[in-house]
Amino acid sequence: MRFKQLQWSWHKIKKYRFAYIFILPTVLGMLTLHLIPIVQGIYMSFLNLSQFTLDKYLGAPFVWFKNYYDVLINTRSPIRIGLFDAARNTVIYTVVVTFGTLLLGMLVALMVNREFRGKGFIRTLFLFPWVVPTYVTGLLWGFMWQRGVGIINIILVDILHLLPSKPFWLIGPNTIWAIIIPTIWRYWPFSMLLLLAGMQSIPEELYEAADIDGASGWRKFWEITFPLLRPVWSILILFGLIFNVYSFNIVIMMFGFGAGFPGEWGDLLMTNIFRNSFMQWNFGAGAAASVILMLTMILIVNVWFYFYKKAEEETR
Amino acid sequence: MNLSYYARKRIKDYLIHIVMLIILLFTLFPIVWMVYTSLKENTDILVGKIPLSHAHNNVAEIAPDDSSIWILTSDGGINKHNRKTLKESDYKSAQTMTSSFHTDDKYIWISSANHGLLRYSKSDLNKKSEFDLKLPSFDKAKVGSTTIYGTKDKIYFSMKYKGFQQVVEFNKKLGKVVRTFNIKNEFSPSQVQSLFVAGDTLMVGLDTGLLSVDIKSGKIKKGFSIMEYLPLGVEKIKLLSNGKLIIAGNNGAYLFDMSSGNVVKNIYPKAVYGLSVLNGNVYIGTNHGFIAYSAKEPMMASPLGAENLFHQIKRDGTVNPGAKLVPSEVVAIAGLGKNLYVGSTFGRISQYNLNSKKVVNSAVARQGHIVVSWVNYVDMWKNVDFGLYLGNSFFICGISMFFAMIFATMAAYALSRFKFPGSKLFSMAILATQMVPGIMFLIPIYSNFVKFSEITGIPIKGTYYGLIFVYSTFFIPFSVWILRGFFAAIPIELEEAAHIDGCSPFQVFWYVVLPLAIPGIIATGIYIFLTAWDELILAWVLTSADTMTIPVGIRNFVGNYQNRFDLIMAAATVATAPVMLLFFLLQKHIVKGLTAGAVKG
């Protein structure tokens, strides 16, 4: 019996030899650069890994859950300070950016999805921000948000006189908007592109039938466009959530040109962990925070999948 | 409203179009602003000035002749005005920066740091000659001003920047540089600020002293240190009829005896902006007018001296006696007959009648040409090794894209066509890699590389292949995820038919599936290239000075130049331009490919 089973799986391997050869390089790469480092990273989160013990690396003292205690409970540990601010900011940032990109992308996709001259060219122009590298986005908007010399304050105060005095954008509670708006600016064209493609694949007959029934444009959107685009926007939400939680370049380049502290309202989990790991040499705690974040993300993605599947079954 | 259905529809459509264009404007504005500020001067950026600067149109030289008066401004502006009415009759801009002029009967000669030596014909300003100076030390990219002194058939000039330790002699008839005087001396390093030829002697005013050079032999005769009197240098030299020199600068004007090498007397104690010797008088332009001295010793302020002369002239040049005005520096004074022509900063010129002692007429030279600071790019390029970074980025991103595409295509095809044991686990693993914070990989990968190098002796950190390996592997999972959709969209019947015809699985893949998937592969490849171009953290940790990519280079650069927004924006533009261009050229493939994969997958 056991022999037969073995033979069977050998047979299968032979049958799928082609497929296994094809995925082999990817699997090898993922093992060396994904799986092993993740396991090491998780192990690191149990070590007291600082600048004194970095040489020993995985031989550093094993401290069990001390890092987790420092990250979550011990209010006096340096990494715990500011971490909850960063978590709050990350939640606001991720949700606003994800749905902001989707909303703006949908709006412009609906506008571009008409017949007019130069449609392809205008769509290309809309896509330009998406090609600007994120570190440039951070630098550029960091410059534009400057209080005295930034163009945003010049337009708001000096030209339009909308505000009585020039506000600080990179200090204080405004900071959260100073990081959200550039991120939306950078990423919304991509949502627009995918939604536009989705709209173009919706059969025209549906709209014609709705026209005959006398449906309004609003109604047509909610009854036809929006539901039929569900595969696109649900993927956009999923990847938006993941990407934005792990967003790093824009914020790090906007403050102190890659070495500054974004402040109470600008710090994200990624910048916080990066600072704690590489500027305060607290690698163990950084790893612990990363692991917690990763587990949270896995949970969120699974919840998303659960609802996605459920909704899919309902529509069938 | 009683509008027809179609009319309402058209109005609605029109409004939507306008809203769309407004959004487009807002979308593109930051990119436009980035490129625009990279062309501005940093001082303009720091004061929040939006338009580009005009070059300063200070009057550099006034040259009257029989019928007209030539107002030559330091931005290379040649203003020809009527001698009597001071009305403009012709204008030409040489588009040079901080230039100096020499005029003779036929020509106007301009020396400037960015264009070298130019010649304009007085009779027809469109006749322009540019001379190839063939000087190895002349660098057009350097910012500096120049000084020039012309005689009947020769021109002597020098550039006012460190490293140009020469005075160039140019023959007007031959139209080329005849020789250069090396002025390296006991005061070096120094820069030339003024020139004057007296007989066989060339006087060279430096920022550190004064030199006399023998023109025939080309050797330095003597150097005079006048730091005690003019610590900022000799900016102006003029010869008096009694053989004595007047030297002037930011700390006053002095009478200088060449034979003894001593300063004889202080004539004027404050900053001197203009200096002329006319009709036996010495005219000194001050910061709010001019003052005249008799050229005979002992020098006394002549009754002509009118320090408050320019209080009578408005900023726009109109005469307004009795009005108090912003002082402006008198930089050029020239005379003809009973008239004195006085030019000042902001391009103003006034005709002063020596009999009535009043300003008779005045005019303003044209505003300087708009300055586009291309030099920001040159400066930035000099300060950082951008060529190396660009090359590194192209090489690493290109090769990584190549490998990632090959392996991702294979894996995606296997995943979309074969339900092999472990395929579900594999596709889950691919999605899971996207859920790990990149920072978690950083230390393990770095430490593993260091350990690996210690054990095997093969360096990985700071090498091209190290980063290429990391990039290719990191971008494979997402590429597989996108490409799977493309393969799923290719009808399986084609493959079955090929299989029945006797193709091996690889042949099916190579000859049937791959050609159909090419658009998707190209699109994914470009996407990977853009993402790799964007990658900062891994490159930060894994590159060394030789293999640094653009993002790391920029990060280091902006850290050192925090207030040089002009340079930072120039760097940002240089980092964006290649990918922008790539995108613009290939956008059809990207749009088609990405959308097809994402929508169907």
Image: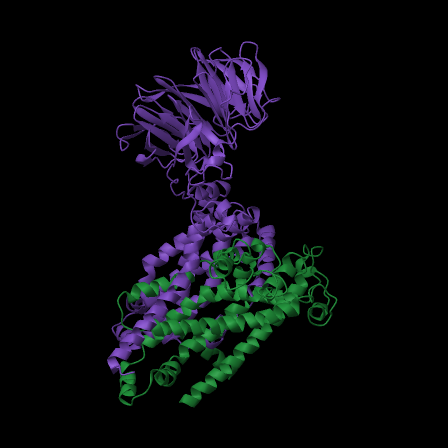
Chain colours: A green, B purple
**Residue placed most toward the observer, A153 or B129:** A153
Q: Is residue B318 left or right of residue A117?
A: right
Image x and y of residue B182, in percent: 47, 19
Looking at the rendered image, the quarter that the C terminus of chain B falls into is: bottom left
Q: Where is residue B181 in the image (x, y as percent from the top left)?
A: 45, 18
Residue in view at x 62 percent, y 22 percent:
B228
Q: Residue B91's x, y, as percent? A: 31, 36
Frontmost residue, A310 versus B11: B11
User: From what the image shows, is residue A263 above or below residue B492?
Assistant: above
Report how many numbered discs are placed on residues in the image.
0
Viewer-side residue, B470 vs A226:
A226
Does residue B276 appear in this view? yes
Q: Residue B424 in the image: x percent, y percent?
A: 47, 77
Residue closest to the eye, B38 or A290: B38
Q: In which quarter of the image is residue B96?
A: top left
- Quarter of the image with the N terminus of chain B in it: bottom left
Q: Is residue B426 visible?
A: no
Q: Is residue B510 left or right of residue B247?
A: left
